[in-house]
Image (cartoon, grey):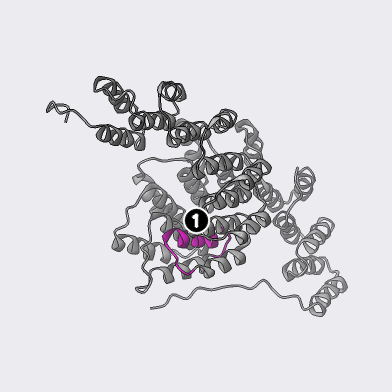
Amino acid sequence: MLRQGLCPSSFAMSSALRACARILYKTGGMFIHAQSYKYGYCSCVYVKTTLVDLYSKLGDMSNAIEVFNEMVEKNVVSWNSILHGYLKFGNLANAKLVFDQMPKKDVVSWNSMVSGYANIGDMDKACLLFQQMPERNCASWNAMVRGYVDCGNIESARNVFDEMPYRNNISCITMISGYSKYGNVDSAWQLFNQMEKKDLVLFNAMISCFAQNNRPKQAILLFHEMIKDNVDVQPDEMTLVSVVSACSQLGDVRFGSWIETYIKKAGIEFDDHLVTALINLYAKCGNIDKAYELFHVLKKKDVVAYSAMILGCGINGKITDAIRLFTEMFDAQIRPNLATFNALLTAYNHAGLVEEGYQCFDSMKDHQLVPSMDHYAIMVDLLGRAGRLEDAFELIKRMPMQPHVEVWGALLLACEVHSNVEFGEIAAQHCFDLEPTTTGYYSLLANIYASVGRWDDARKLRKVMKERKLARIPGCSWTEST
């Protein structure tokens, strides 16, 4: 337009600025800003408002404020653009000043401030503003639900959800994500089934919920429901990442071939997230060569991809490769995270390298990482397998959190291997307290008693199991249909 000597309209200039804001194109936006003076739009409220919006989205609040202050006439969109800019970059104090100065507030203004307080976990102020709102829309209610979910108050989130005069799929997805985060899968599933119209994002949330909470078969079954001809929903990369994650939990390499075939037939692009999920699947299923093949085609190898490969090498007996990959990460200036150390410790555990495992565990602090429950469980298992039961017990005693049943279970299993009654009884008692209805722990202690000739104690335990009708942990199998 400019090359042809045509004078752009205010609408054309505003549209071009909105396009720059959408793709965060600062150079283009500044060029158009300069042109706005040339063509006499320096006082046009619509052009000025889109400039404020552009600079706010870029985080250039000094330019945004300068343009805003130049405006002779301001509308509510102008004020909301400044408000959004401060909130986007965490400047809640300035956002509140702008909000208080606004001559007129619409529902977007109120929603922005409610979300601002909710995002930092200040639900008291968010709730106070919410109650003061002259009008609310679905986004207002969703902001409150999201705020309570993010700060872990699922009960309050559900109370707000139940009070909503109208809901959309975002409301439901937010609650499902909250239930998923805190392990309440049944409530998430109940909510999912209550929704009449289920779109892609809703299916993705529920499949992800199953996959993240160790219910892989349900995730895959729901995926099969999703791709039926009578369900008008097309899976995307996010769907497939969750499904591949579920497949990897089942540990059957046949799923890798099936899911790859489906992805190709559906014409879904193999992005790095999906390839990384497939790496994890093949590595866990024992096809480490296929995992390596996929790893090498990644456009960008990040900490997730490296962690998946390190874990795969570790559980497939390739400890040297696992260590090499860990070193390679540092050369690529990729910082390890908790999952990386979980993978490397697992590799040392499978190889029985106790001292190396200890050094790895201790080095976590050098990376400003605090070991989680899973890291302690791996270390207890590593020490226990090596017969260092006292060291394992002392490590448990030093844990900064209350040990969960996997930690005590690892010690109990090691005590069975080494026929150690002293620590076996301690570990078993903790397992009984944490999971009183699980028979496996009683069986392990009974086996320890039997291994040292304490037959009466073994019989007593088995009698207790029979009297309490303790059930074994149910196993599961997956039969491939043809």
Q: Specify the segment rendered in magenta.
A: 196-215
Q: Quadrant of the C terminus?
A: bottom left
Compared to residue 446, the image places residue 300 above or below, namely above
Question: How many residues crowd mark 1 within 10 Å: few (<14), some (14–19), many (20+)?
Answer: some
Asked if residue 299 lies left or right of residue 319, the reply is left
Compared to residue 476, the image places residue 257 above or below, namely above
Q: Is residue 297 visible?
A: yes
Q: Residue 126: x percent and y percent?
A: 63, 43
Q: Residue 317: x percent and y percent?
A: 52, 52
Q: Is residue 286 visible?
A: no
Q: Observer-nearest residue: 316 or 24?
A: 24
The residue at the point 60 percent across, 29 percent down is 93
Q: Observer-nearest residue: 197 or 478?
A: 197
Q: Amino acid at mark 1?
A: Ile
Residue 469 lies in the magenta stretch: no
Q: Observer-nearest residue: 318 or 374?
A: 374
Please tell me in which quadrant of the rendered image residue 415 appears: bottom right
Residue 200 lies in the magenta stretch: yes
Compared to residue 269, the image places residue 338 above or below, namely above
Compared to residue 250, the image places residue 69 above or below, namely above
SS at mark 1 in the image = helix
Q: Quadrant of the N terminus?
A: top left
Q: Residue 402: x percent and y percent?
A: 76, 49
Residue that lies at the very extreme toward the right in this rendered image: 456
Asked if residue 186 lies left or right of residue 109, the reply is right
Q: Residue 247: x percent and y percent?
A: 47, 63
Asked if residue 383 lies left or right of residue 43, the reply is right
- Magenta: main secondary structure: helix
Q: Observer-nearest residue: 394 or 417?
A: 394
**Label 1: which residue?**
170
